[in-house]
Each structure stands twice: as structure tokens, then as C-alpha cells.
Image: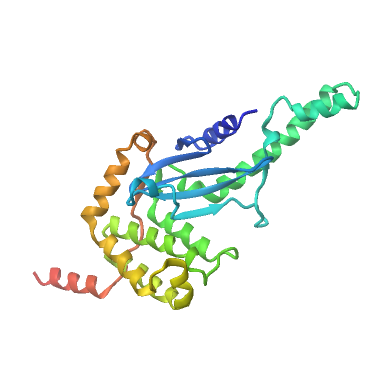
Amino acid sequence: MEFKDIVKEWYEQFPILSKYTPTTLFAKAGIVLIGLRLERDHYDYRVFLEILPLWVPKEKIIIPVFEQETRNEKGLQVFIDIKLHDPLLLDYVEAQTKRGAEIDLMKFEIQRSTRRKIIDHAMECVHKQFDAILQEYVSLGDIFRLINNHTSSIVFDRNNPLDWYRLFELKLALAYHFNREDLILKVKREIEKEVRNWTQERFNVLFRVSKEEWKAELYRRMENRDAFMRQVELNLSLKKISKLKQIHIHDDMERGNSLLQKFGNFLRSNK
């Protein structure tokens, strides 16, 4: 069985997605691409949810700003044996033939049913973990909850800037895209809080800039909305991306009461 047939099975599970590369399924969603990546090893594969940025040069789109691996109910990684997908059970038939045994049709069907249950369980884990944002209409709140749940999980290294910096870029990009001044301020406060946990020496080695330089550059790129959206539009027009189906993100997040908002409300009420 060819791996493209396995990818097709996953497409049937998530029809809002389209084939993007031989091992990925994505949909365009405003300023990002959202989808699944099937990471193949020799005998098995794993499924990851990824969010790719569209505000970067096209050659950098492949670098995810969010990535999370599928896990089961016990929090363990889900490895799916490639041969489980083979409806002809060639490995099973070959093993029986080598033993000189006849193929028992009843045992054959039991074996096929057992294998299918393993695949169905893996697919159920992906649905349970990622269904909220693999729909035609997705809330901004669900995306932020996905990120926050990920950063609070036991597999996330809170003191490693490599695990943080792309997530902050994603959060800030979404906040700017939806023109949410309160959300922008909230994300910046999160950044300031977490940056204190990163040692300057290690940060310099990893990024070859200081923490302050990194923040300044990030804020500068996000604040230049014209350049930001121009790059997004250029990437959305790429043939490979333009043909993808669309996920619509709507802003459902409660608005905070920042001083700036309070001042604005005061001015409006006194007109």
C-alpha cells in the first residue's frame, strides 16, 4: 500500500483540509495555514497538528509557528504501523504462507477488523485533540486555548526560548490581525513575564541577538501592518496555497478593560 493512500484516508476524516505536500493536509485560515502533517518513519508514522505563518517570505512558510503531536488518553505518543492500513494484509498472508498454513477466512477478517480498530482509535485521538480548529468555522478563542493548553502540558519546556518564541509570534500576529489592542497588550505582558526565565547567555547562543533586540524586532514586524498584510496576500496568491480550502476564524474573545480602552470609552461617552 502506498503512503499516498494513507494520506487520502486522513483527508476523508478531515475534508476541510486539502493535500498540500505528499505528507501534509492543510487549509488556509486568514494569516495562517492550519493542518496535519504525517511524519513517516520506515515502519510507522505519527500525526502532528501544525500552524504555518503566511506573514513570512514564502521560503519560510514551511517552519511552523505551532506544532503539537497527537497523544492518546494516557498522554503517550501515537505510533501507527503503516502495514495496518493494507486491506489485503499482505504481511499476514505472507507469514501464513511461509508456515505452510492455509488462509482461514474467518481469522483473516478478525485480523483485518483488529487492525482497523487500531487505526480508528488513532484517528479518534486526532479528532478529540484537534477537532476544534479543523472545522470550516473556528474561533480565535479555540486557537488561543490550544496554544495555552500546549504550553501548560508536561511535554513543554517552560524555560526553553526555542519552545516559546514562535508561539509568541503566532499569538501576537493574530492579535494584530484582528486589531485587538487589549490582546496585543496581554500577549506582550506574557512575553515580558516569560523572557525573565531565559538566561541572556543562552539566548545569545541560540538567536545571536539579545532578548531586547529580539523583542524589538518582533514588535516592529507586527506593527508594520501594511508590510505584514502585503506578505500574507502574496503568499495566499501562490498556486499551491490558493487552491486550498478555507477555514474561517472569527473573533469570539472577550475584550479586556485596558486603560487605553477605558480612556476611549470615556471620550466617546462625553461626546
In the depicted structure, whether residue 209 falls above or below residue 124: below
Residue 136 seen: no
Q: Quadrant of residue 247?
A: top left
Instruction: Tell me residue 150's x, y (percent).
Output: 52, 61
In the depicted structure, whether residue 139 falls above or below residue 216: above
Q: Is residue 81 left or right of residue 104?
A: left
In the picture, the quarter occupied by the C terminus is bottom left
Q: Is residue 50 left or right of residue 248?
A: right
Instruction: Tell me residue 220's x, y (percent).
Output: 27, 64
Colouring style: rainbow
At x 35%, y 45%, the residue is 58
At x 56%, y 45%, the residue is 127
Q: Is residue 233 left or right of residue 266?
A: right
Residue 260 seen: yes
Instruction: Tell me residue 230's x, y (percent).
Output: 24, 48
* Tally of marks: 0
At x 62%, y 52%, the residue is 71
Instruction: Tell me residue 140's x, y (percent).
Output: 38, 54
Q: Nearer the viewer, residue 210 or 156?
A: 210
At x 65%, y 39%, the residue is 120
In the depicted structure, whether residue 197 falls above or below residue 214: below
